[in-house]
Amino acid sequence: MSRRRLLTLVAVITLAIIGVSLLLITMYIKYLLMPRHFHPLPGAVVFPSVYYGALGCWSHNVNIVIPGNSMVVLNYHVHGNVTINGVVIDIAFPAGIINETLTAFSRLSNPGGAFIIGVYVNSRLIASHATSSPIEGLKFAVSNNGNGYMAVAYTSIEAHLPPINLTSDDVITVLIYSAVPYALPSCAVTNEGEEVGLMVRDGWIGVLPTSNATQAAEQLYEEGKYITEEPAIYIINTTSPMNQLPQELTPGLLAEARPIATGYAPSFIMGYVQLPQYVRTANSG
């Protein structure tokens, strides 16, 4: 294994460890929603879950850099009747922006709101969550990296929802406000048909745990139950720090969005997990 790959692996593992210590339930739910090619840790409790949309763009990916003081707008289209209660968006910190990111973070008057993620259904806000845990994890990884070089660090931000029943033609919009620079690991796809082809081919959608009786990616696709992402990343520049996201995506607000990248879809997971009562009734924000 090359030195760069080893350092990248160390960065990923380190960020995962600090993420668990900072937001145990958040990272636990993300684990439950992971695509099937991740195998459970020995002794781990795996609750039944299903993911209707997922992309994993870590290998041979393109890291699309997002500037600070901006809102990213991602649109997803629902096919069939599905229920979701969790959204995960992968983010990254390539070496070229790490110093800029940490410097911007150190100057924030409200560090806890470095990121705000919101999930909208048909333009209405369902849930939002403000967090600084990705930056705290990055700081930890950098300060404990004895070699002084990190190629890229991967982590994620999540939104947990009350169970939302969706039908065909519903539109899910994920809005991410960031006060600091970061990047979106993205797959090159020209259209949503190509994207769902990746999902099915690589088994990123379906039911966990798997068995002969559970719905595989091919079964969900044949039944028309899946969520696809519009292969375009829109951005809205902000003039001042934000403490909360708008309750509604108005035509005026969306008119401010401009494409920062087309033909690319960022890594994401959308699905439903059957959580135990003590987790399911926790704050969804």
Image (tube, rainbow, N blue to C red):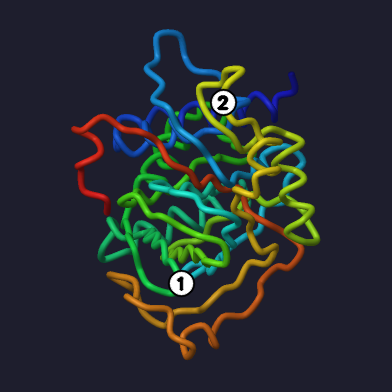
| Residue 243 % position (x, y) | 28, 70
Q: Is residue 19 visible?
A: no
Residue at position x 35%, y 57% in the image: 106
Q: Is residue 115 left or right of residue 111?
A: right
Q: Are marks 1 and 2 in contact (CB under 8 Å)?
A: no
Question: Which secondary structure, mark 2?
Answer: loop
Q: Locate residue 133: give its quadrant.
A: top left
Q: Position of residue 84 (x, y in %)?
A: 43, 48
Reading the chain from its start, which is encountered first: label 1 or label 2?
A: 1
Q: Quadrant of residue 27?
A: top left
The reply, left or right, for residue 126 in relation to residue 199 is left
Q: Amino acid at mark 1?
A: Asn
What amino acid is labelled 2 in the image?
Thr
Where's residue 121, x and y in %?
43, 66
The local crowd at label 1, few if under 14, some if 14 to 19, many if 20 or more residues have their Cα within 10 Å, is: some
Point 37% across, 78% down: residue: 248
Question: Residue at image x 59%, y 53%?
Answer: 227
Q: How many marks?
A: 2
Give residue 122's mark.
Answer: 1
Q: Which residue is mark 2?
A: 214
- In the rendered image, the residue lying farthest to the top is 42
